[in-house]
Image (cartoon, grey):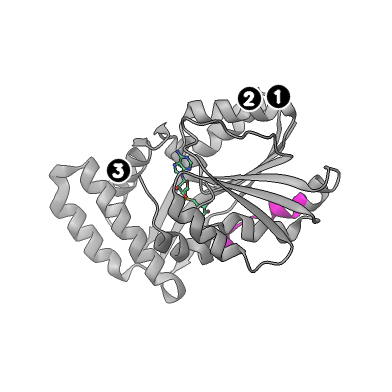
Amino acid sequence: MSFSADWLALRAKADRRARSDLAERLADLTDALPRPLKVIDLGSGTGANVRELFPKIRPPQDWTLVDADAELLKRAKVNLEHHGGLRIALHHADLMVEPLWTEHPHIVTASALFDIVSEAFVDRLASALARQKTPLFSVLTYDGRLKVTPDHPFDAAMIDAFNAHQRGEKSFGRALGPDASDTLTATLRRYGATVLEDDSPWRLEARQDNELMQAKFDGWAAAAREMMPDQADAIDNWRAARRTAATVFVGHRDHLATF
Ligand SMILES: C[S@@+](CC[C@H](N)C(=O)[O-])C[C@H]1O[C@@H](n2cnc3c(N)ncnc32)[C@H](O)[C@@H]1O
């Protein structure tokens, strides 16, 4: 599964609006840590998480952006290079098979990542964080909640199909999908972490987010066609009806774990 830079750009504004206030704790949390602060952002894509978080943390900071997609990392460099005082390094790596890091960071961050990873990956990460008592700040993990208005009789089937698809094989193996938020919390706690959580849902409205909503419906319908090949007509009808949807709610959760 690959993520296009266009899709990441399209969702960036909604992601920014959705972020919870948990990030406000980063300043206090990281103040006591050494400088330069070494931060690793996992699954960085085009660098959206770095852009949001670094202004909340006292400099100097050295960020390493890790991603399996070299093109997205190149975009991240371009997107971030005009931010004065921000020092970044790019690390092109498939986190499914390669080490999480070579030099241990002071804090690890991620955005919109944990729903595509496997249970084994969360366990590996939580174990590595616990060994060095390294905090984790993760945002925008999909949690299975989906709601579109106005209601449509095929919504329930579409939601089930989407969530089943989210649990399918992705680049980390079988993905956690809608179970990611709960699994992340439970696994980190099992390794001794204190975990704070907050809600960070998308609340999309057609008057300002229609392009993102329609892209979301396209992806959703494509996933449903894979899961319910015998329901092609019903899916097409649902997709056509959703051209005039008023709102979309997509549940996400943010997590801050300390050891
Ligand atoms: C949904 S995107 C999120 C990107 C970015 N964090 C954001 O919020 O815009 C997930 C990212 O994980 C990366 N990714 C997927 N599988 C990966 C793997 N096995 N190892 C490293 N990165 C991976 C993708 O290339 C993509 O950039």
**232 or 73: which is nearer to us?**
73
At 16% from the left and 47% from the top, the residue drawn is: 231
Please determine whether, in this image, residue 57 is positioned above or below residue 166.
below
At 46% from the left and 37% from the top, the residue drawn is: 94
Helix, strand or loop for disc 1: helix
The spot of residue 243 in percent (x, y) is 28, 68
Q: Which mark is residue 26?
A: none
Please determine whether, in this image, residue 218 is positioned above or below residue 185.
below
Residue wearing tag 1: 131
- Depth check, mark 1 against mark 3: the one in front is 1
The spot of residue 124 in percent (x, y) is 56, 26
**Residue flagged by tag 2: what amino acid is it?**
Ser
Q: In which quarter of the image is residue 134?
A: top right
- Position of the N terminus, as image quadrant, is top left
At 84% from the left and 48% from the top, the residue drawn is: 31
Quick check: is the Cβ at mark 2 less than 8 Å away from ligand 1? no
Magenta: main secondary structure: helix
**7 or 229: which is nearer to us?**
7
